[in-house]
Image (spheres, helix red, strand yellow):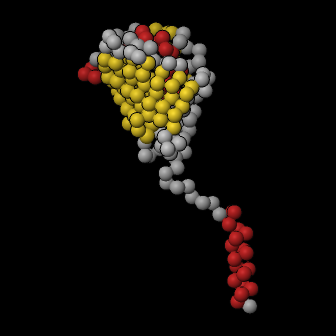
Amino acid sequence: MTKQVWLLAVIFLTGCSEFWVKPKPASVVEIDTNHWVLKGRLGVKSEEDAWSASFVWEQNQADYAIQIVAPLGQGTINITGGEQFVIAKYPDGQIIQYLEPDQVFQEALGVVIPVSSLRFWVMGQENKTTAAKIRRNPEGKIEEIIQDGWEVSYLRYSSDNGLPSKIFIEDDPVEVKLIIKEWEFGANDGG
């Protein structure tokens, strides 16, 4: 009789096991790739100039808002845009609308940076609208993307969320270094 009860218990527990929800490991982070905010430091070097700044970038679907804050009170540039427009507000109060996102960076910062691809690169992905060569590390993470003449090297990934935290982007003579200090994910709360 004891064997029968034991056997029934095993069958019952095994049969119900598919209803038990296994908790996700602590290392698994839910990431909303449609809406995110990242904060960090930006360093840019070209033949003519070199500068650094802190930045906050909020992406919501195709819309974005990027705030670039120069050190020592040199001013803030606010860039907002989407698929149809890009607007830059300069430290002197001047507001200019551009047709292409890359044009803003050329005008405002003196270098061409492919913003349309950058939004994918910061997430550790290639821009799927153009061809890319990808090299992965032994863990399967992207180590390098070569796309549209730009070489994107992932020097470090965050242990918190597995996303890039140090990225080097180069298209000779332009070099861009991004140090991402903080990622936030979630629905746009309007503020």
Q: Residue furthest bottom?
A: 1
Q: Residue furthest left?
A: 72
The quadrant where residue 173 appears: top left
Q: Quadrant of residue 1?
A: bottom right
Residue 95, image quadrant: top left
Residue, x 60% and y 23% (percent of image)?
131
| 189 shown above or below 42 | below
Q: Residue at x 72, y 74 (%)?
A: 12
Q: Position of residue 54 (x, y in %)?
A: 35, 27
Where residue 174 appears, as percent x and y from the top left, is: 39, 17
Depth check: 162 or 135 in front?
A: 135
Compared across the picture, whether 173 is left or right of 100 comes to: left
Q: Is residue 165 above or below residue 4?
A: above
Number of labelled discs? Answer: 0
Q: Is residue 72 left or right of residue 103?
A: left
* Residue 68 seen in render: no
Q: Residue at x 48, y 21 (%)?
A: 150
Using the image, determine if residue 112 lies above or below residue 190.
Answer: above
- Residue 71: horizontal and vertical position, in percent? 28, 23
Task: Point out residue 104 in the picture as x, y percentages from the top left corner.
Answer: 46, 12
The residue at 53%/12% (across/down) is: 100
| Residue 49 seen in the figure | yes
